[in-house]
Amino acid sequence: MSEAENKFVFVKNDENASEHIAAPKYSYWSAVFKKFLSNRSTVVILIIAITVVTLSIVDPLISHYDGLSHININDPSMQFIHPNLQYLFGTNDYGDNLWNVVWIGARNSLAIAGLTTLITTVLGVVVGAVWGYSKRMDKWMIEVYNIIANVPFTLVVFVLMYVLGRGFWQLIFAMSVTSWLSTAFFIRTQVMIIRDREYNLASQCLGTSTWTIVKNNIMPFLVSIIVTSISRDLPSFISLEVFLAWLGIGVGETTPSLGKTISANRTFMTSTPYLFWIPVAISAVITISLYVAGQTLADAADPRTHM
Amino acid sequence: MKRYIWGRVIRAILSVFIVTAVAMVMIYTLIPRELIFKTDATYQKLGGKEDDRARYKYNAYEKLGYVDFIEQSDMCEAYASDNYDACMVVDSTEINNILPTYKSEGYTVEQYKAGLYYAYKDTPIMSIVGTFFGNLIQIDHPWRMMDSDNATLDSTRGIYWGLDYNGLPALMGNGTLHKYLIYIDGSFPFIHQNIIQLNLGTSYPAYSYTPITQVISSSQGTEDTREQTFPTGQTVDSAIIQHSCEYKYTSSLDRLDQNKFTDNYAECLTQKSDPSMIQDSMTIGILALMIGYAIAIPAGMGMARHKGKLGDHIGTIWINFMIAVPSLAFIFFGRQIFYLLGLPQSFPTFGAHDIRSYIPAVVILGLMNTASLMLWTRRYMIDQESADYVKFAKAKGLSEKEIFRKHILRNAIIPIVHGIPANIILTITGAVLTETVFAIPGTGKLLPDAINDHNNQMIVALTMIFTALSIISVLIGDLLMTAIDPRIQLEEKEGGAH
Amino acid sequence: MSEEREAILSANDVHVQFTVRGKTLNAIRGVSIDLYDGETLAIVGESGSGKSVFTKTFTGMIDANGSVTAGKAVFEGKNLYENKTDEQWEQIRGRKIATIFQDPMTSLNPIISIGKQITEVIEKHQGKPFDEAKKEAIQLMTEVGIYDAENRFDEYPFMYSGGMRQRIVIAIALACHPKILICDEPTTALDVTVQAQIIRLIKKLQKDYGYSIIFITHDLGVVANVADRVAIMYSGQIIEYGKVNEIFYDPKHPYTWGLLSSLPQLGIKGEPLYAITGTPPSLYDEIKGDAFAQRSDYAMKIDFEEEPPMFAVSDTHFAKTWLLDPRAPHVEPPTQVKELHERMKEAIRIQELELHEGDAR
């Protein structure tokens, strides 16, 4: 029985051993990417989005097509060729290869939407973050916001485009100037929610500098929100450009865009439908793939979904 | 609470005012004036005759309030009335003496090819804005009309009760702009008034010089005649709406007028067969809204209850699709599908009285509404589901269905109801695209048309109307919330639209 | 003097596991305890000891990523864990076993009147029409101490203070005369004075209605006021249980000693306050031996190798520690524990002295 006896001997305990944390290791960014790529259909959509953006950048560089010079205009045999292996999207009434027309239009539409999104997001986040954090600024900014916010956004864009005239930069300006405020308000609300959360108050009490609190506590929280906002803005700006071009108040005469192509080809809806439906379909593919990829990234960036 | 409402109302008025004023200033200063003639046929026809064209141009500008336009005849009348005939000679000494006076007052003096002078002065932009707002609300009264040709007018000015041409009691006036100030007829809201009216300016070049309020609210289409008896006793088939008759200057009265009317009130609207623009837009807008809610709310609730399962995934795909796809593309897809089902591709095909004309637009617009509604409904539901009181209700032994119906739903309805008025307005304004594609003669289509025509006044008027509607709807939504949620006491701190 | 009492709830070797980020968490690792008719059983433990989770298994309210993987809980002749569907659980919840939670502020639906929140339970479980239910609800409200109940029936929760809301919550829980009332830290969110009122209320109603109480808390002071028997939980197991006097004056487990020693009232001016070092072990890992060994001043080699069984100290007092094994060396509990009674009396005397001194000034 001496062995059992041995076991009833006092043992000094190791204080450190009891402080060991055994919960599964967690790294924010690796969790984000793991979640994002976990779904196969998401990966497919991401590939589609990347393909589309690449094509819109690369094709105009290769084909040197700029929407203005119609090299085949004097050759009637090149007009209205239905889609075949040589001309994947067919040719239009000028004899231009619709493939080139579509991709340069896509490039411009994406550029417009992208720049607008960039401006509204940067402005919105910067202003919104300060707005949300500073109680003093909130007092008067809210009054300004209440007055301006309820004006219908599309209406203002119309009037602005009417007044400024058509054009690439005018369009970007008009869309940015009307959208940044709602992004700012959105960010402001989110910042206000977490500014007063106890973990931020605790950080403050520990003497953490404001910048560090913003960097470590608030920014990661905002990442998911910002990505959501971007993923929604981008398709809506593309949609708006298409809409405006249809009404004749979008980009200028010399700039090709998807909206203009769709509008120009509307007369061919019944005679040579592919000329109309293909740009419409491509615009839908672009917006859907970018949106879904963005939304999924936003979901993956939200730490609450990392369970 | 009352103070809060007043605060909101004042803020609303301020918003509308600022937005409209800014729009007006931008439009009138930044847009080259000549563009308004781009689609004016008369102007185009006067291409070769420069003098006639100039006169037409500046007359038009004056009618629209842009300038003060004076011809040599007016100048001579004002400063050389005793030497009028001598003055009215080309390059006369008299006129050359008068011109500096006008120049010093800021007029630009120009000369017709034929030799006579004319001058114009730009109305200051603030004055244009001021005139617009000053004239916005018009109150009719018996001293409004001045007609030197009408001898009996001054002695018979006044307001009196009487019976109208249908034998119903009405309040009428003499010397007022409208004959019938208050009257009763069969259309909603049954008792109508002409005393207080909205003046949004005149439309040009489209609907030449027609008041914009009339453009929007009067019936369209072909004339709709019915038999009626006029004050002279004449009984004929006519489309005239007698309740709308306004004062016509004695010098403009003609034989046809005198056959029908015993007084000067002969400037009347005609009844047309199709609904007005605003009726078209509202019909389609409200129907689309109802369809949108009828689909979106049950769908959103269903998605919340079956979170993570197939129904939720399908719903999410639909929402993502609707948000991502360009609205124009969706409208075209939809229109094509309806076409294959035998429905018309444009509204005028079957006209305003055939239900088939309405179906594609209403359904498409309704579906476009569903996306964000479904998303938000689902989110509100899910937020409620993780609330503590739900946990307690579960511990009480209530079933999922009961908890859902009695607790979660009631809480989630509050923000949903809050958004209804805003959605109503969004639908009406968002119908711009749908109306343009389907060629529906509604208020939505007016805007892009006006932009293409450079119909500046119309653009300003529409800006004001849409802004006002939008702001009012949000205010109503907030007030509705207080009615439903016992916790809310509205404070000044609330933010704007969600 | 052992009373022949019915065990209305018998839990036997219950195991509960959760799946978190792909890993398995052993939240409850073999708990067995009986609940007798009409008694108040306090379950005491640190956060994460499993006290809430354990009681949630009786009403099927553990989170979706967890499940009972072994064991039985026999209530009214049936094993509770055989209930799978919501309909089956609805028969138990509210009607037979009621729960009240920690935060009264959020337990009530803010937009439904408090009266309706009581009547809906009565209507559901007893099938009574609204008017009858309303009468009962008003009577309940009066019993829990709401004055002028009839007029306050239609009021909303936001009009009430925390203490009053908790009374309403109690009224709701008792509306259907359940056999068991689970109180999950019901006084933790309340002021000390309100705490006392609520506890008094719960005990008084227990005499009137005759239910058994499972009272979950981490506050030993509350336990002394409330409980007939006490069970101490640590790392997903009950490590000691017995009558309240036995636990307070004759505890046998080192963890219980540590808990009792940590009572701040026992502190002597000038001496450092006692605290148990370290933190509970992770439940993701397989725990070998006695879970408390790492933090115990009395750990033996065997504590790290084999899990101790439940040793009987008396008919009613059991402890799960190798120290009770006859082969173990004799150990005296720490001084604070031995002198618990005296020190508590001293602490109260000093408090009263200070009060009188305050009055004198």
Image (cartoon, coloured by chain):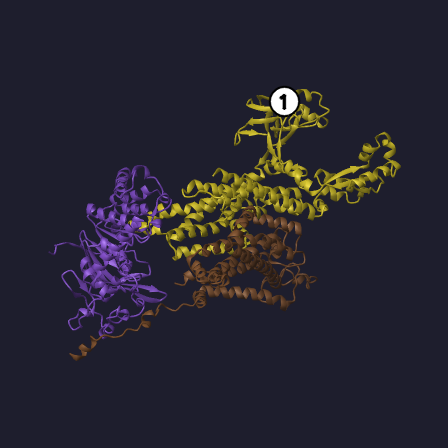
Q: Position of residue C152 (x, y in %)?
A: 32, 39
- The image quadrant of residue B92 is top right
**Amino acid type, residue under disc 1 in the picture:** Gly
- Look at the numbered disc 1 and give the secondary structure of its residue: strand
Residue at mark 1: B158
Residue at 34% from the left image edge and 39% from the top image edge: C154
Residue placed most toward the observer, C240 or A55: C240
Q: Residue furthest front?
A: C361
Q: Chain of mark 1?
A: B
Q: Is residue A216 above or below residue B460?
A: below
Residue placed most toward the observer, C204 or B352: C204
Q: Position of residue C206 (x, y in %)?
A: 21, 48
- State which quarter of the image contains the N terminus of chain C: bottom left
Q: Residue furthest left?
A: C1
Residue at 57% from the left image edge and 54% from the top image edge: A240
Classed neighbour count for the residue bearing mark 1: other residues with Cα under 10 Å, few (<14), some (14–19), many (≥20): some
Residue at 43% from the left image edge and 54% from the top image edge: B315
Q: Is residue C256 above or below residue B237?
A: below
Q: How many marks?
A: 1
Q: Colour of chain A?
A: brown
Residue placed most toward the observer, B185 or A11: A11
- Residue C237: tell me if it is visible: yes
Residue placed most toward the observer, C304 or B405: C304
- Residue B201: tell me if it is visible: no
Q: Colour of chain B?
A: yellow
Q: Colour of chain C?
A: purple
Q: Position of residue B433 (x, y in %)?
A: 57, 48
Q: Is residue B461 above or below residue B325?
A: above
Q: Position of residue B236 (x, y in %)?
A: 62, 25
